[in-house]
């Protein structure tokens, strides 16, 4: 296991492109960290700097308290799994797993022991004599993970390892990777653009946008306490609803709404006159809410999608489109008026200009 520390890490590529800005993060021994964000936000660049495959332009990177900026890849105690699992097609699963160890000149009986132990962790024991062409995508990815695991490293780096798999295999591999992490315990950094993967696998998530960290937190913290509009919109599927308006006399005013903000804002005077974004998650709305601590909102239904466990309702609040998740037994007709409640504890407010969350006086549960 290893402890990692990033201090003001920056990456400027030789062509002048500034891919990572002032990246600061401490990763504890054995943590599972996901870097998540849209394509091009600097996730892989960060991972490659950890691996020593990319120079760090400025800042300090420490492994177990040792400055590692100039440390060679080989000395970092790292194994990496990429999106393309690139197994050797002419070698069996056994030989693929053993390949790196054979090159290092390790004794055959030690290799045998390690291959068997790794195959056992990954459920590959019965496939050891097979060639990659006779394996499913998920099994191939497991072999790729096995090749990294077999080397007993302290740091495990994964770059979109599941993106070549179909949806079902991805779900299975997600829990397998979690279990492997639990049994092996190596500090893990996992790169993905998929927020569901990040939410389900991580101890903590680092949300990135345009080369900058937006927020670091547990899945719970990011979902219930997003610090800015980007994180609020990125985490959660379907995404959070945003309704823009102005604060007048302590009320949110839009073409369709007039909501008293006092119950959900700590310092109501501080936001008077500001442009704000009123926000709530599709799944946080209520249809038969009995309490008084809520906003009642009228909408008109555009379209409904019955998913089985829920119905997605696409509706308009004035001229704003919103998505609502409701009980499928209460699915409204298209075109109907649809009244719903947003409990105060599920309502968020963001400053339109700074995009930062405005401090709430509500507990989220
Ligand atoms: P992500 O992994 O989040 O998709 P990357 O870290 O791969 O993003 O890339 C971040 C940004 O850096 C992108 O805009 C990409 O085009 C740019 N980039 C990546 N590699 C290079 C390079 N060798 N030279 C110049 N720009 C690069």
Image (cartoon, helix red, strand yellow):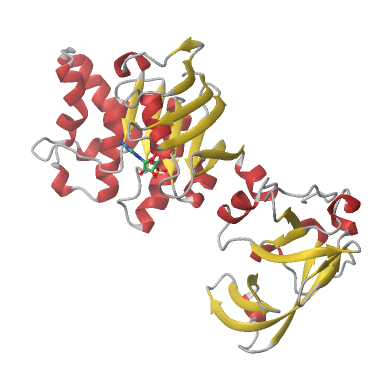
Q: Is residue 240 above or below residue 59?
A: below
Residue 231 relative to residue 110: left or right: right
User: Could you tell me which residue is drawn at 63 percent across and 81 percent down?
Assistant: 331
Ligand 1 image position (quadrant): top left
* Residue 356 seen in the current view: yes
* Residue 119 seen in the current view: no
Residue 221 x/y as whole percent: 67, 43
Q: Which one is nearer the viewer's eye here, 25 or 275?
A: 275
Q: Tell which residue pokes out farthest to the front in this image.
A: 16
User: Could you tell me which residue is drawn at 30 percent across and 28 percent down?
Assistant: 148
Q: Which one is nearer the viewer's eye here, 351 or 280?
A: 351
Residue 344 relative to residue 18: left or right: right
Q: Quadrant of residue 46?
A: top left
Q: Is residue 222 above or below residue 277?
A: above
- Figure disc tally: 0
Residue 341 x/y as whole percent: 78, 71
User: Could you tell me which residue is drawn at 70 percent across and 56 percent down?
Assistant: 352
User: Could you tell me which residue is drawn at 91 percent across and 52 percent down?
Assistant: 269
Q: Is residue 236 above or below residue 22?
A: below
Residue 136 x/y as whole percent: 23, 50
Q: Is residue 353 above or below residue 206?
A: below
């Amino acid at each position: 296991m290893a402890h990692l520390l990033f201090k003001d890490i920056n990456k400027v590529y030789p062509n002048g492109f500034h891919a990572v800005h002032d990246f600061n993060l401490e990763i504890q021994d054995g943590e599972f960290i996901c870097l998540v964000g849209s394509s091009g936000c600097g996730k892989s660049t960060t991972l490659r700097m950890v691996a020593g495959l990319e120079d760090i332009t400025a800042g300090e990177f420490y492994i177990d308290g040792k400055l590692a900026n100039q440390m060679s890849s080989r000395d970092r105690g790292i194994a990496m799994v990429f999106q393309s699992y690139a197994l050797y097609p002419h070698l069996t699963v056994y030989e693929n797993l053993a390949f790196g160890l054979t090159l290092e000149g390790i004794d055959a009986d030690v290799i045998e022991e390690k291959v068997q132990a790794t195959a056992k962790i990954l459920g590959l024991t019965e496939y050891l004599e097979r060639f990659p062409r006779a394996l499913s995508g998920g099994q191939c990815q497991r072999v790729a993970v096995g090749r990294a695991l077999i080397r007993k490293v302290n740091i495990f780096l994964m770059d979109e390892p599941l993106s070549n798999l179909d949806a079902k295999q991805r779900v299975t591999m997600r829990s397998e990777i979690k279990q492997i992490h639990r049994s092996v315990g190596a500090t893990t950094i996992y790169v993905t653009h998929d927020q569901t993967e990040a939410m389900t696998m991580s101890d903590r998530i680092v949300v990135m946008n345009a080369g900058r960290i937006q927020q670091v937190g547990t899945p719970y913290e990011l979902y219930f306490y997003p610090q800015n509009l980007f994180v609020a919109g990125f985490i959660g599927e379907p995404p959070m609803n945003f309704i823009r308006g102005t604060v007048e006399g302590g009320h949110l005013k839009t073409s369709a709404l007039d909501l008293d903000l006092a119950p959900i804002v700590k310092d109501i005077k501080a936001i008077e006159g500001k442009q704000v974004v009123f926000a709530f998650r599709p799944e946080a709305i209520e249809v038969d809410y009995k309490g008084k601590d809520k906003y009642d909102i009228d909408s008109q239904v555009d379209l409904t999608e019955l998913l089985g466990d829920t119905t997605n309702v696409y509706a308009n609040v004035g001229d704003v489109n919103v998505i609502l998740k409701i009980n499928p037994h209460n699915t409204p007709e298209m075109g109907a008026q649809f009244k719903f409640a947003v409990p105060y504890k599920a309502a968020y407010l963001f400053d339109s200009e700074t995009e930062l969350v405005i401090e709430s006086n509500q507990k989220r549960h």
